[in-house]
Image (spheres, grey):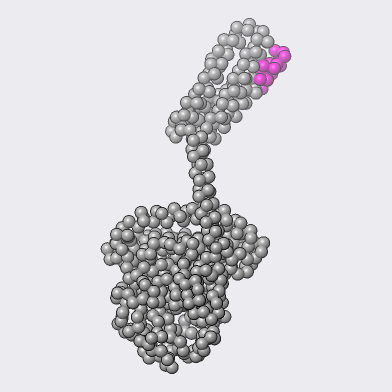
C-alpha cells in the first residue's frame, strides 16, 4: 500500500516503503510580498473565524491520530499511511490559514485538506523514523517548543500589530518583513511536522537556508529568493543542499531500480516513460543529472497525462508548458498545478515537480541581511515579553493571599466592632438620658463601623466570590456607620427619636452580621 502526499509541482509524490529513508524536511514555499486589499486587511481576523472553527474540530481529531500514529511508528518505524495523509492535510490547511492571518497573502484559503494552488505551499515526505526518537519525541521537542514560544511572543503578537498597521496603510508588506515572517511561520510548521512524525528531520532553518556557491559565485549572497531576490538571468540553477546529486538525495540505499522503474539514479524512469520521444539525452548519458529533466522536448510525464502541446525548449529561452494538463490545469497558470509568476524551478527528488521559474519562490528560503536582523528582533522581543509577563504573574501571585490569611485578617478587623457593640448599651444607660452623652456613644460606633468597612475593602480575597462577599460586607458596614453618624449629630431628643425610628438601625446592624457570616463561610470553604 502506498500513500500519496501533495507535491509542490501539482502531482502527487508516492511515499513507498522503500523510497523514503533519508531525512526529508518539511518544505514551505511562499509567493512573496504582493499588494493586498486594505479592506480585507482591516477585517482579516474576522475573515479567518470560519477556518479557525473548522481547524479547532480538525485539531481534536489530529491529536487523536497523533496518538494512534505514535504507537504505529514506535512498533513499525513508520507513521501509518492514514495518519500521514490526515496529518499532512491538517498541516497544509493550518499553514494556509495562519499565513493568511498574518498577512503573508491576500488570497482566501480553501476549505480543504488536499494540496491546492495557493501562494503558501507545504510539501511533506514521510519516511522511516527512528524508534528511539519516536519514543522520546516529547523530550526532544522541548528546545524547539521554547524557540517557537519565544518566536510567537515576538513575531505574532508585538510585531504583528506593527505589520498590520503597515499593510493597512501602504497596502503591502515590505519584502524584508515578509521574509522574516515567512521564516518564523516555516519554523513553526517544521516543529509541528516533527511533532506529528511527518519527518525525522529535526526543525531547523529559522534564519533561512544556506545555499552553496554556484558557477557564478555564492548564491547565498543573493538578497532573497524568487520574488525576494532573483538569480542572474543566464546562470544555471544553483545546486541545492541535499537535492539532485548532493549527499542525502542522490542514489540512496533502496533507491535504485524500483519495480516498473528505469535505471535512473534517485527516481529513475517513471512508469510509462521508457524512451522519451524526441529526447536527446537518454538515461545513462553524461548530461543526465539525477533529479533534473534532460534538455529538449518533453515526452510523457507521470501524473500529467498525454504530453500533447509540449514544445521544444530552446537554450536561453523560457520553458513553454502546455496550457491544459489533465487534473492540474489552473486558469491563468502556465504550468500545471503550481506555477505562478515569480517561482524558481529547482527539482526536489521525492517532492514531485518543483515550483517553476514562473511560479512560487524556491522551496529553499534564503533571507536577506535585513530579514535576519528582524528574526533576531523577534527573538529578543519574545524574550523580553515573556520575562515581563512572568514578572507580572509573579507580582500578582505574591499579592494573592490564601483563604486562611484572608479569614484571619477579617476576624482581626471585626474585633473592635464586636467590642463597641457589646459596650454600647451600658454606655447609653450610664448617660441617664443626657443627649450629649448618648450622641457621643453613637459617634464612637459610627467611627468603628467606618474603619471596619475600610479594612474589609483592603483585604485581598482568594477568589471572585469572596471578593464580592467582602464588598457587600463593607457596604453594609458603611451604611450602619452613616446611621450612627446621623444619630450622633442630633441636637434634640425629638430629632434623635425620629432618626432612630426611620433609619432601621436594628435591621442595618443585623445585615452586617449576616454578610460577615456569609463571607466567613465562603472563606472557610475556599
306 or 451, nearer to the observer: 306
Can residue 454 be seen here? yes
Give the quadrant of residue 31.
bottom right
Task: Reply yes or no: does residue 492 show up in magenta.
Answer: yes
Q: Viewed as shown, does residue 9 lie left or right of 371?
A: left
- Give the magenta-colored segment's residue range: 485-503
Total marks placed? 0
Image position of 426 with respect to 304: above or below:
above
Q: Is residue 333 left or right of residue 27?
A: right
Closest to the observer, 91 or 340: 340
From this view, report whether residue 450 is shown above or below residue 403.
above
Q: Which of the two residues, 492 or 34, is positioned nearer the viewer here?
A: 34
Residue depicted at 59% across the width and 66% down the height: 175
Q: Residue at x 62, y 13 (%)?
A: 441
Q: Position of residue 514 (x, y in %)?
A: 52, 27
Q: Is 480 on the left-hand or right-hand side of 217?
A: right
- Left/right placement of residue 205 relative to residue 371 reads left
- The furthest residue to the right: 491
Residue drawn 55% across the image and 24% down it: 510
In this orientation, does residue 271 appear?
A: no
- Measured as percent of width and height from the top left, residue 348 is found at 42, 75
Amino acid at each position: 500500500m502506498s500513500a500519496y502526499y501533495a507535491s509542490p509541482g501539482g502531482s502527487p509524490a508516492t511515499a513507498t516503503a522503500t523510497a523514503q529513508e533519508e531525512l526529508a524536511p518539511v518544505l514551505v514555499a511562499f509567493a512573496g510580498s504582493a499588494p493586498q486589499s486594505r479592506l480585507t486587511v482591516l477585517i482579516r481576523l474576522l475573515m479567518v473565524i470560519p477556518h479557525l472553527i473548522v481547524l479547532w474540530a480538525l485539531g481534536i481529531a489530529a491529536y487523536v491520530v497523533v496518538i494512534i500514529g505514535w504507537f504505529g511508528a514506535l512498533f513499525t518505524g513508520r507513521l501509518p499511511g492514514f495518519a500521514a495523509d490526515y496529518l499532512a492535510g491538517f498541516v497544509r490547511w493550518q499553514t494556509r490559514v495562519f499565513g493568511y492571518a498574518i498577512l503573508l497573502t491576500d488570497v482566501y484559503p480553501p476549505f480543504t485538506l488536499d494540496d491546492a494552488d495557493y501562494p503558501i505551499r507545504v510539501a511533506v515526505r514521510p519516511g522511516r523514523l527512528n524508534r528511539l526518537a519516536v519514543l522520546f519525541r516529547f523530550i526532544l521537542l522541548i528546545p524547539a517548543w521554547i524557540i517557537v514560544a519565544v518566536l510567537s511572543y515576538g513575531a505574532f503578537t508585538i510585531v504583528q500589530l506593527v505589520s498590520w498597521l503597515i499593510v493597512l496603510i501602504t497596502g503591502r508588506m515590505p519584502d524584508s518583513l515578509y521574509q522574516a515572517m515567512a521564516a518564523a511561520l516555516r519554523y513553526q510548521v517544521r516543529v509541528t511536522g516533527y511533532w506529528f512524525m511527518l519527518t525525522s528531520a529535526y526543525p531547523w532553518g529559522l534564519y533561512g537556508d544556506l545555499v552553496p556557491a554556484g558557477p557564478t559565485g555564492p548564491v547565498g549572497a543573493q538578497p532573497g529568493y524568487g520574488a525576494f531576490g532573483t538569480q542572474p538571468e543566464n546562470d544555471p540553477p544553483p545546486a541545492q543542499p541535499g537535492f539532485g546529486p548532493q549527499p542525502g538525495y542522490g542514489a540512496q540505499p533502496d533507491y535504485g531500480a524500483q519495480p516498473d522503474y528505469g535505471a535512473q539514479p534517485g527516481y529513475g524512469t517513471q512508469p510509462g516513460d521508457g524512451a522519451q520521444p524526441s529526447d536527446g539525452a537518454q538515461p545513462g548519458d553524461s548530461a543526465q543529472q539525477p533529479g533534473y529533466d534532460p534538455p529538449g522536448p518533453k515526452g510523457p510525464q507521470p501524473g500529467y497525462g498525454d504530453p500533447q502541446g509540449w514544445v521544444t525548449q530552446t537554450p536561453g529561452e523560457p520553458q513553454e508548458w502546455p496550457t491544459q494538463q489533465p487534473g492540474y490545469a489552473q486558469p491563468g497558470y502556465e504550468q500545471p498545478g503550481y506555477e505562478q509568476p515569480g517561482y524558481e524551478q529547482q527539482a526536489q527528488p521525492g517532492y514531485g515537480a518543483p515550483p517553476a521559474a514562473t511560479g512560487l519562490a524556491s522551496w529553499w528560503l534564503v533571507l536577506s541581511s535585513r530579514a535576519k536582523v528582524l528574526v533576531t528582533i523577534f527573538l529578543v522581543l519574545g524574550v523580553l515579553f515573556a520575562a515581563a509577563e512572568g514578572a507580572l504573574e509573579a507580582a500578582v501571585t505574591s499579592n494573592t493571599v490564601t483563604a486562611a490569611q484572608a479569614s484571619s485578617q477579617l476576624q482581626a478587623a471585626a474585633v473592635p466592632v464586636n467590642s463597641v457593640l457589646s459596650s454600647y448599651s451600658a454606655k447609653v444607660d450610664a448617660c441617664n438620658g443626657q443627649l450629649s452623652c448618648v450622641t457621643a456613644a453613637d459617634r464612637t460606633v459610627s467611627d468603628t463601623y467606618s474603619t471596619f468597612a475600610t479594612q474589609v475593602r483592603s483585604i485581598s480575597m482568594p477568589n471572585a466570590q469572596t471578593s464580592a462577599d467582602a464588598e457587600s460586607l463593607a457596604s453594609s458596614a458603611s451604611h450602619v456607620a452613616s446611621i450612627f453618624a446621623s444619630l450622633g449629630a442630633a441636637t434634640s431628643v425629638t430629632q434623635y427619636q425620629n432618626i432612630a425610628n426611620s433609619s432601621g438601625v436594628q435591621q442595618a446592624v443585623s445585615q452586617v452580621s449576616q454578610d460577615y457570616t456569609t463571607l466567613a463561610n465562603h472563606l472557610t470553604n475556599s
